[in-house]
Structure formats: C-alpha cells, structure tokens
Amino acid sequence: MSIWPRVLITGADGQVGRALLTSFAGSAEVIGCNRASLDLANADQIRKKVRAVAPDIIVNAGAYTAVDHAESERDLSFAINGRAPGILAEEAQRASALLIHYSTDYVFNGSKKGPWVEDDATDPLSVYGASKLAGEEAIRNVGGRHLIFRTSWVYAPEGKNFVLTMLRLGRERDSLNVVDDQVGAPTTAGELARATHAIATGILEKKFGADRTLSGVYHMTCSGSVSWCGFARAIFKRAHKLLGDKTPKVNPIATSDYPTLAKRPHNSVLSNDKLQRTFNMRLAPWQSALDEVLAAIAAYPRP
C-alpha cells in the first residue's frame, strides 16, 4: 500500500494539467484524466471516477476555456465550469479529500484602478467569466476542504496560448497590432503547478495549521503586470533566435479596435498578498517566467 498521497488531476492533457503531472511526479500517486477518460460535462462520470480513485487530493485543471465560443455555447460552458466543480466538491467531501480548483480574473469587470483582492465584488462581463464564477459558488455552497486559485493569462511551452501565437505571427509578419488597454499578469502553467504542489503537500503535512480554516479563494498569478501589447513586445525582444533574429514591430491599439464576441476586463491585475500571507508563497515575476518558457520552446523547437 502506497504511503504517498493519491492525487486525481482533471484536464491532464491541458497546459496546467501537464505541468501538474510533472510537479506531483515523485511525491504522489498521480491519476491524470483527460477529456477522453473523464468528461466534466457528465455528472455520473465524475462521481464514478472519484469514487473509483478514492483520492486524497483532487486538482481540477479541466475547464471550458474557449472564451468567445462560450458566448454561443453557454450550456456546455456552465456544465463544465459551473456544475462540474460542485460535483467534484461533493465527491471530495464524501472522500474527505482536498479539492483544488482554478478560477479566473474574468470574474471581475475590470473597472477597478488597482489590483483586485479576493473580497472585491464580482461582476463577470462574459459567459465564460459567469460560468467560472458559478463554479466558485458551487464549491463554496458544498463546503468541505477546498482551495480556489484565481489566475490569469495562462500559457506554457505547448498548447494554444498567446506566446505561441505571437511567435507564429512574428515569423510570418513584420508588424502586428496588439491591444494595449487590457492589463494583467501573464502566468505560466509551470509556476501555477509549482505553487499548487507546494501548498497541497504543505497542507497534508500540516504546515499551515488547521485545514478547514484555509479553505477559500486565493489569487495566484506571476508577479508584476503588463498590457497585451507590452507582453508581445517582451516576447519578441527575448525571442530573437526563435524568430530568426527578426523583431516585428508591435503597434498598440485599443480594445475597441479589436472587437471580440466576449468582453474582456481592462484591468485583470490580481493581488497575491493573501496567498503570500497564508502560505508564504509568491510566484516568479512574469518576465523571468517568460524567459523560462521561451528557453523550453527553444530546446524543443516546433517544425
């Protein structure tokens, strides 16, 4: 019988899921589930899977993340982002397991001048944001041992994300227009997974005090902030070799000049003070996290 904790990870083939598999490897018995093995829109599948695995920790890295498509796929978005977390919370409580769930900056409307704190009033602008907020509320309504980590602008060396899109467009074009009036904290899947692993194992080892007093919402992003335009310029500045020594020009534009189906918050900066106070955890600055991802991409170049 294994003395390691048993960890069930949903969305295991996504950006955060893959990073979590790496972080927990060697310190836990990890069971990763992708969409083929666990459809989060299917309540019965969720219950059967959790009961079969009997985990000590459930990390819900699965989500409906197609922000614009969610506007026309509301039911599916709410099934995966809104209802599934509540079912996971029920099963976690039944198994006396810790549930860790990721939420988003999109639960806020972006109108605040400074960084958002956990107790600020939520007001999502999109179906995606509303569905993620519904997931938070479903978990809180169940209770039990849970951590909800709100994060933002997630990317990794693989998958579909802003960094890889910029690198592709940077090879194809000499000039790009990028929104400059939306500000947030680009956050790597690797930093999220590192912090999640440290906090989860620390809780099991009773490093932070009584479990139930820790339950709640925490903001978890890389430190610092930048606009999408500034982020694109930073990518190109650091990725000379990946782009064949070219540096495309990045032209700042307003959100109104780049209309999308879903509205995005202008200010997505989240305060991480509560995370640091409670768990003594701070993620890397977004610049050094970006350097790490670009190094990983360079080590395994794409065709």
Image (cartoon, grey):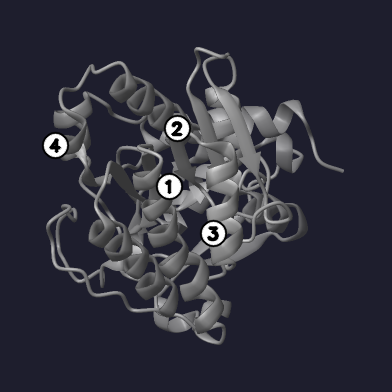
**Residue closest to the far right:** 303
Q: Amino acid at mark 1?
A: Pro
Q: CA distance from mark 1 to mark 3?
A: 18 Å
Q: Which residue is mark 2?
A: 191
Q: Earlier in the sequence, mark 4 or mark 2?
A: 2
Element assignment for label 1:
loop
CB atoms at circles 4 and 2 under 8 Å apart? no
Decide if residue 178 is on the left or right side of residue 256: right
Number of the front mark, 2 or 3: 2
Q: Label 2 is placed on what type of residue? A: Glu
**Res. 108 image quadrant:** bottom left
Residue 88 point in image, percent of width and height:
44, 53
Give the Cα separation between the discs numbered 1 and 4.
29 Å
Read off the residue under disc 1: 186
User: Residue 136 occupies which quadrant of the picture?
Assistant: bottom left
Task: Indicate which label's residue lies in the foreground, 4 or 2.
Answer: 4
| Mark 1 neighbour class, 10 Å CA radius: few under 14, some 14 to 19, many 20 or more | many
- Displayed quadrant of residue 266: bottom left
Residue at 46% across, 80% down? 262
N-terminal of the two: label 3 or label 4?
4
Label 3 to label 4: alpha-carbon separation: 47 Å
Query: Image quadrant for the C terminus?
Result: top right
How many residues crowd mark 3 within 10 Å: few (<14), some (14–19), many (20+)?
Answer: some
Q: Amino acid at mark 3?
A: Val
The residue labelled by disc 3 is: 250
